Structures are given as C-alpha cells and as structure tokens.
Image (tube, rainbow, N blue to C red):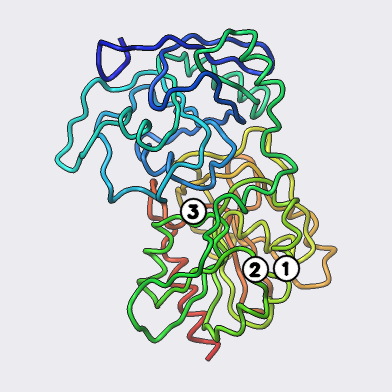
C-alpha cells in the first residue's frame, strides 16, 4: 500500500506516447487526465524544491529514488509560490512523514498546489525507458488507457514552446536591504534559493522577462543576473535580443536557461539533450582551475560549445560535464560576462559551486 492513508485510494494509470502502461494509485489533486513531457530526477532528497522549481513547467517529474515524502513539507523550502510541473510520479509515497520541520505531508501538499500525482509506479522500468528513448510525452489519471494514450500522443512536450512567459513575474519587486551592490535579476523562472544567494551580496530587483535591455540598464545596477527557467531556448528570441544589448554594458552572470540565452546571444546554438540532466550528483570540471565539483542540475537543453570557435567574440568553455562532455559554463574573454549550466545555489544539492556568486560580486566590484 503506497498512499499516505489506507483509505480513499484512487486507481489510475500512466501511459506513455510509445504505448507503455504503468498501473498506480492517484495522489494529490484529482485528475482524469494530466499530461506532459515525462523526465526523471535522480536526487535522493529535496522533492519539495524540485516540485516547486519553475524550470519544470510543461513536464512531469519522475523520482528515481523509491521512497518519497518521508520528511514531509514545510513553507521554508519552497522554490516558488506554486508548482509549475504538470504532475509527479513516484514509486512509494510515505504513509507518514517524520521531521520536526514538517507542516504537512507530500500528498496533502500536492492537493493544495492543485498538482496531480501517481504513486505505486515501477519507476525503475520507467527510467530505463526514458534513458533509452529520451524524454517522452505521457499522461496519467483516472481515464481509460485508450484516452490516456491519446492524450500522451497529443502532448507537445517542451520543444518549440515559450514557457518562460508562463512562470515569470508580472511586476518588478525588490529583495534585500540597502547594500553597496545593486543587482538586477531577469526572471525567466527564478528559484527562491538563487535570490537568497544573490541577496548575500547586494540588494536585488527582480524584473519580468519582458523587460528590455534599455529598461534594465536604466536601473543603473552594478550587475545583471540571468535566471534559470523552463523550456526551449530556441523559442526565446526576444530574450536573446535583450541579453545581446546587455553584453559589454554591465557585468552579467547566468544560470541554466540564463546560460543558454547568453550562449545564443553570443551566436552559439542550443541543442536538446536525449533525456536531460536532472539530479544532484553530476560531476563538473572547472577547466580554468582543474577543480571538480559535484553539482545540481535541471535542464533538457545545452549550449553547443563546438560553435565557439566560429563566433565573432572570444568565447571559451569554462566548465564541462564529466559524464557526457556537455558544456557547463562559458565566459567572454575581455568582458565581464560568464554563465554556468548547472545550479550553484543547489536547492536541493551540494554547495560545491556556490563560490560562483562570490565571483559575480568580485566582477561587479571590479567594474566600478
């Protein structure tokens, strides 16, 4: 029995676009049909942060760790006010949570967020399919298998869609007290932990993704941060134009989608990875120092570093993923401009790369 309670379990199924069927028990918000691009995350903990990460817009998150929900949910660890993901897929949902910080259970939390989930799924088999086939559209719910299959095959996934517009802030807002450094953060789907890290080095004004380069520069900030976010960077030409207008004008630091948009603004294309990088244990090598760091990652697309040699600017790869050679960082030589694909704030995950926020602060100080 996988639910948090023995009573009221709702039978359901997960069906992938390739016809694979997984039986399970529906949890969280009721759903006749919930569909999205199915991806997997290998983190052993941090399920709350993952579920509330805006970068998962359009996707359904499969947790490869079998036992999820054992330490419950609290208001402090959320990475946003809601859940952008389309659904949550787990093997065993803890019947009872046990932690002094817990305020409610995962199933209750999903219901409160309006997010459906399914438990009792053979996530090991599911992960093998995703590793072999790549991210696959899927659908789960109480509907018939035929209806779920139709919904899965009709699901567009995340390719060719601007998902940033669905998660960015509507209005500017500020964080942190008066400080010697003033930072502008462009919100492509920014995480709370990232903003918390930035406020350690200055006051932060968060702006909608639609803000133009001229409006950003008019703030007179010491530096501009390009946030993480969901979806296909190839569909974000307006953001590429904005960042193009900022390069060389102000110190820039980008993370994840911000890294991809910066790469595109410099002229490098992006490519979609087979099943993406989602987890808290990816080894990354800093090519400038030789240091190897264990990193937190969440992305389906990557910058094509092979294109750097042909760009009009002196761009070099600064970090590489040791698992598959994917570009994990870049910088413009001679400019105050760098970015990384992985998540140095690590919510959840290791803090090996948090020194990059200090590098951004030093860059801002050096620009004065």
Label number found at residue 116: none
Residue depicted at 54% across the width and 69% down the height: 207
In this view, 141 is above or below 46:
above
Q: Which residue is mark 3?
A: 343
Marks 2/1 in contact by CB < 8 Å: the verdict is: yes
Q: Which residue is mark 2?
A: 331
From the image, state whether disc 2 or disc 3 is nearer to you: 3
Image quarter of residue 307: bottom right
Q: Which residue is mark 1?
A: 315
Q: Is residue 155 visible to the viewer in this orientation of the structure?
A: yes
- Disc 2 to disc 1, how far (Cα)? 6 Å
Callout 2: helix, strand or loop?
strand
Looking at the picture, tell me which residue is in the foreground, 309 or 135.
135
Percent x, y of residue 174: 42, 72
Residue depicted at 45% across the width and 48% down the height: 294
Residue 275 relative to residue 222: left or right? right
Looking at the picture, tell me which residue is in the foreground, 218 or 19.
218
Q: Residues within 10 Å of mark 2 (few under 14, many from 20)?
A: many
């Amino acid at each position: 029995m996988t639910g948090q309670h023995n009573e009221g379990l709702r039978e359901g199924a997960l069906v992938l676009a390739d016809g694979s069927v997984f039986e399970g028990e529906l949890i969280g918000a009721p759903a006749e049909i919930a569909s999205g691009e199915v991806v997997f995350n290998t983190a052993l903990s941090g399920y709350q942060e993952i579920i509330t990460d805006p970068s998962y817009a359009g996707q359904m998150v499969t947790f490869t760790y079998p036992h999820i929900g054992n330490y419950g949910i609290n208001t402090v660890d959320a990475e946003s006010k809601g859940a952008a993901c389309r659904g949550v897929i787990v093997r065993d949902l803890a019947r009872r949570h046990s932690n002094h910080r817990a305020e409610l259970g995962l199933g209750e939390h999903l219901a409160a967020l309006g997010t459906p989930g399914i438990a009792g799924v053979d996530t090991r088999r599911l992960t093998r399919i995703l590793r072999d086939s790549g991210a696959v559209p899927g659908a789960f719910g109480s509907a018939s298998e035929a209806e779920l299959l139709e919904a899965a095959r009709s699901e567009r996934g995340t390719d060719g869609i601007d998902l940033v517009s669905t998660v960015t802030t509507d209005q500017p807002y500020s964080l942190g007290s008066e400080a010697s450094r003033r930072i502008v953060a462009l919100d492509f789907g920014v995480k709370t932990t990232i903003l918390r890290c930035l406020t350690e080095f200055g006051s932060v004004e968060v702006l909608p993704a639609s803000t133009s380069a001229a409006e950003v520069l008019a703030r007179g900030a010491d530096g501009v941060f390009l946030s993480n976010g969901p979806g296909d960077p190839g569909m974000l030409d307006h953001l590429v134009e904005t960042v193009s207008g900022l390069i060389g004008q102000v110190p820039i630091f980008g993370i994840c989608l911000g890294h991809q948009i910066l790469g595109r603004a410099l002229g490098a294309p992006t490519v979609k990875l087979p099943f993406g990088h989602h987890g808290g244990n990816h080894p990354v090598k800093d090519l400038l120092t030789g240091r190897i760091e264990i990193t937190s990652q969440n992305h389906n697309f990557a910058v094509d570093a092979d294109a750097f040699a042909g760009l009009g600017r002196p761009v070099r790869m600064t970090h590489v993923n040791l698992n598959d050679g994917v570009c994990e960082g870049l910088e413009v030589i001679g400019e105050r401009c760098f970015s990384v694909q992985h998540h140095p704030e690590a919510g959840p995950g290791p803090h090996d790369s948090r020194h990059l926020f200090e590098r951004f602060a030093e860059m801002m100080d050096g620009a004065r």
